[in-house]
Image: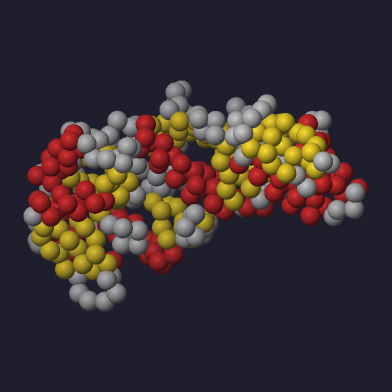
């Protein structure tokens, strides 16, 4: 898949020097001055050549070919060009003029938000389609992202027009992180929790825990046992105490791939790389819950290397303290409204710490709890 995304730059995507970037010679040395950042950047000979050709509207492919005529092999020429382009984009010295086809896009729903992603080619969209449980073709988009590729890098921008980049194998996790941040910041929630959310009938369950606690693996187990998926990473909490998951496709790290294969034997092994280095796979859930839910159970995961599975009941104060530790808000502070929302959640739910080693054993004990047997 990655090779399909890579390759030469599209003629529809054009690089332009920023309006406030000025090229000059000082004692025969090439420099760029950024009016916005009030900074001077020195260029080497190749960098100066690339910049001057960009000013003359040369294409990147053309520049690489011209560097070849100067005795630089094609691979090195492309490497120089990519490095210069990335550095100048990061410093605001270069702009990308985006010309996206309106026919190359995907739309999806995440909770109450409609997402539209426009790609320079369909291979890019294939890399991103795995993130979403449900695609649609509604008229109004809340968040719009444009994505293009050049060489081994992918560039994207949202409504704020800020250009970001990542490697091709990191595209899906990077876009997911970007969208999660946008949704949290734009949604009218009191705060958010690091928690997976599921439903069973009209009852909701929150799985809370730090990365590596097994939220996603246990979510996969509980889905197989009849729970409906609502989100595996972040839960948005409204001022009324209602919970909304962000129903991206279920994200599974290497430790859960064996279970994934047992439950979905024909699953395609497409692997993506997160910014923390973790290798992940995505499992879209067709019947994901897209509305609000109220918590009947709050489970704090305590994964251990060995030992038997155990549920320990927590009082409301202990549960509140733990939830506040895992909560985050746009401004970095929990408001009074957020505190009262949290109190409503804790007052209406039973809270437990789940100590476990094997996810299958944890699943059995949680099912007994939810069925009134524990």
In the picture shown, does residue 207 fall above or below 341?
Answer: below
Residue 309 on image: x %, y %: 19, 70
Q: How many marks?
A: 0
Q: Relative to the observer, which residue lies in front, 295 or 202?
A: 295
Side (left or right) of 235 relative to 140: left
Residue 201, quarter of picture: top left
What residue lies at 65% left-to-right and 33% top-to-bottom? 34
Q: Quadrant of the C terminus?
A: bottom left
Residue 56 on image: x %, y %: 82, 30
Q: Among all residues in the image, which is located at the extreme front? A: 27
Side (left or right) of 370 relative to 183: left
Q: Relative to the observer, which residue lies in front, 288 or 345?
A: 345
What residue lies at 75% left-to-right and 39% top-to-bottom? 31
Taking the image as drawn, is residue 76 in sight?
A: yes
What residue lies at 12% left-to-right and 40% top-to-bottom? 344
Q: Among all residues in the image, which is located at the extreme top? A: 139
Residue 105 on image: x %, y %: 56, 33
Residue 21, quarter of picture: top right
């Amino acid at each position: 898949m990655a090779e399909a995304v890579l390759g030469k730059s599209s003629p529809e995507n054009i690089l332009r020097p920023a309006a406030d970037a000025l090229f000059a010679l000082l004692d025969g040395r090439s420099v760029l001055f950024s009016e916005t950042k009030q900074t001077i950047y020195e260029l080497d000979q190749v960098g100066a050549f690339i910049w001057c050709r960009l000013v003359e509207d040369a294409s990147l492919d053309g520049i690489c070919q011209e560097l070849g005529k100067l005795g630089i092999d094609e691979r090195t020429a492309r490497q120089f060009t990519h490095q210069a382009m990335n550095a100048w984009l990061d410093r605001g010295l270069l702009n990308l003029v985006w010309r996206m086809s309106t026919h190359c896009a995907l739309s999806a729903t995440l909770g109450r938000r409609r997402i539209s992603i426009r790609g320079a080619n369909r291979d890019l969209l294939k890399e991103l389609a795995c993130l979403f449980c449900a695609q649609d073709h509604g008229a109004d988009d809340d968040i719009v992202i444009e994505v293009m590729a050049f060489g081994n890098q992918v560039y994207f921008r949202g409504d704020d027009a800020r250009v970001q980049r990542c490697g091709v194998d990191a595209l899906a996790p990077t876009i997911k992180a970007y969208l999660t941040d946008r949704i949290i910041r734009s949604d009218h929630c009191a705060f958010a929790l690091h928690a997976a959310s599921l439903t069973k009938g009209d009852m909701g369950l929150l799985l809370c825990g730090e990365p590596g606690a097994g939220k996603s693996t246990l979510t996969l187990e509980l889905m197989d046992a009849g729970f409906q998926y609502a989100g595996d990473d972040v839960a948005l909490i409204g001022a009324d105490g209602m919970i909304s998951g962000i129903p991206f496709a279920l994200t599974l790290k290497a430790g859960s791939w064996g279970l994934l294969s047992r439950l979905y034997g024909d699953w395609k092994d497409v692997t993506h790389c997160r910014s923390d280095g973790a290798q992940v796979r995505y499992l879209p859930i067709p019947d994901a819950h897209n509305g609000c839910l109220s918590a009947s159970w709050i489970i704090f995961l305590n994964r251990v290397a060995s030992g038997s599975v155990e549920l320990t009941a927590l009082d409301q104060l202990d549960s509140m303290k733990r939830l506040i530790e895992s909560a985050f808000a746009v401004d970095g502070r929990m408001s009074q409204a957020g505190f009262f929302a949290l109190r409503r959640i804790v007052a209406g739910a039973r809270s437990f710490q789940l100590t476990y080693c094997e996810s299958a054993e944890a699943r059995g004990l949680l099912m007994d709890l939810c069925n009134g047997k524990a």
